Amino acid sequence: MPAPPSRRPPPSGARDTLAASATRAGAERSGETAGPEDAAASERSVRPPASTPASKVAREAVTARSAAIATERLTKRYGATLALDELDLTVREGEVYGYLGPNGAGKTTTIRLLLGLHRPSSGRALLFGVDAWRDPVKAHHRLAYVPGEPFLWPALTSNETFEFLARLHDGTDIAYREVLVKRFDLDTRKKIRALSKGNRQKVQLIAALATRADLLLLDEPTSGLDPLMEMAFRECIIEAKQRGQTVLLSSHILSEVEAVCDRVGILRDGRLVDEGTLDQLRHLSAQTVEVTFTGPAPGLAPLAGVDVANAGSNALRFEVSGSIGPLIAALAEHPVAMLTSREPSLEEIFLHHYEGADGSSAHGDG
């Protein structure tokens, strides 16, 4: 079978040590190699301040070693552009973590640093306790990666691509791969060049998922898939979670993240601005209460933590931060025909962090 072109990006599911070595060699050729001064700067960047208690330092060290992903003040600059700003991120083993942010927030930069494709300007990224830049071969051994844009060998069929990658990857589950081929309804006889973007994305997903890797790094993995295939993807993530695999899911499809993720982190301008379970994020956000009256909507006295807006001639919409009790007490004095209350969706939580911003950035990547 023909070897991949030397200048091609590594295929999806880059779990093998050959791909890791090639990645590092490519980084060295492009000037990303860390010299002695860079190494010293990196060590200084992760060394805790002298005032940090020894017990806290020890706890943080244990967390970094035991987590599937741990970044410590991870920073990346491209010239004058700050793409990632002292990111402290921890993803526990067996967790499905949703990584959200608009284009340019720093999501793809984070993943490139986790893969060892780019050298951190300062700080470090650890995968299962292994430094992703200093020891990429060992760091890559337990992960599979799916980018948002498929880069595959056009002259190969899907089946030939799977077989080629299976020879590189240690531990590809052939039986599960066949299950995935049927689930994603992929014709494996066609050459890659004849496939649509969505079908090429299926090839990447199947190859990565079939490795049963301990860590899945997924960067917009459902790009190009139709809604039925998105549901198939969700089923795969639920299966991975049940097997104890860890997943970092970077996605613009908020309903997808809401459906499968244990925790969510929201990135803005290279900084993690919010993080937690959906219940925790909802608790910190306003609750929406819509009230319909039997007559014209009354004027209510201002209440602390309550914003009000007209929702029709005889209806009001309230955004409540904190307890709903004072609002209920105020409404008791008026003829209420119907009252509905709902927690904010992940989309509303996400948009809350971007109020007043257009979501664009000069960073140039996700």
Image (cartoon, rainbow, N blue to C red):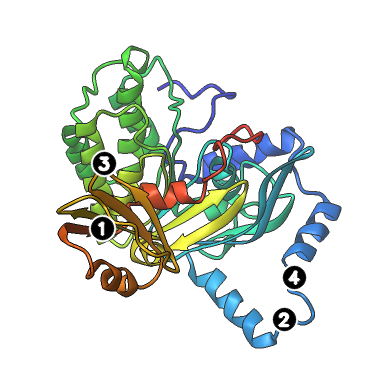
Are the residues flagged by discs 4 and 1 in contact, CB closer than 8 Å? Answer: no
How far apart, in angstroms, are the residues tagged by discs 3 and 2? 43 Å
Which residue is depicted at the point 47% across and 61% down?
A: 275
User: Tag on residue 233?
Assistant: 3
Badge 2 or badge 1: first in the primary sequence: 2
Which residue is depicted at the point 79% across and 65% down?
A: 44
Up-down relation of residue 307 to residue 4 (above or below): below
How far apart, in angstroms, are the residues tagged by discs 2 and 1? 42 Å
Residue 287, percent across and down? Answer: 34, 60
How far apart, in angstroms, are the residues tagged by discs 4 and 1? 45 Å
Q: Specify the amino acid type for callout 2.
A: Thr
Determine the secondary structure under disc 1: strand
User: Tag on residue 342?
Assistant: 1
Badge 1 or badge 3: first in the primary sequence: 3
User: Foreground residue, 319 or 55?
Assistant: 319
Residue 356, percent across and down? Answer: 56, 43
Are the residues flagged by discs 2 and 4 in contact, CB closer than 8 Å? Answer: no
Q: Specify the amino acid type for callout 1.
A: Arg
User: Tag on residue 201?
Assistant: none
Q: Which is closer to the viewer, label 2 or label 4?
A: 2
Mark 4 = which residue? 47
Determine the secondary structure under disc 2: loop
Badge 3 or badge 4: first in the primary sequence: 4
Q: Which is closer to the viewer, label 4 or label 1?
A: 1
Which residue is depicted at the point 65% across and 36% down?
A: 363
Q: Specify the amino acid type for callout 3.
A: Phe
Would residue 79 be found to the left or right of residue 95 on screen?
right
Up-down relation of residue 251 to residue 190 (above or below): below
User: Foreground residue, 200 or 171?
Assistant: 200
Mark 2 = which residue? 52
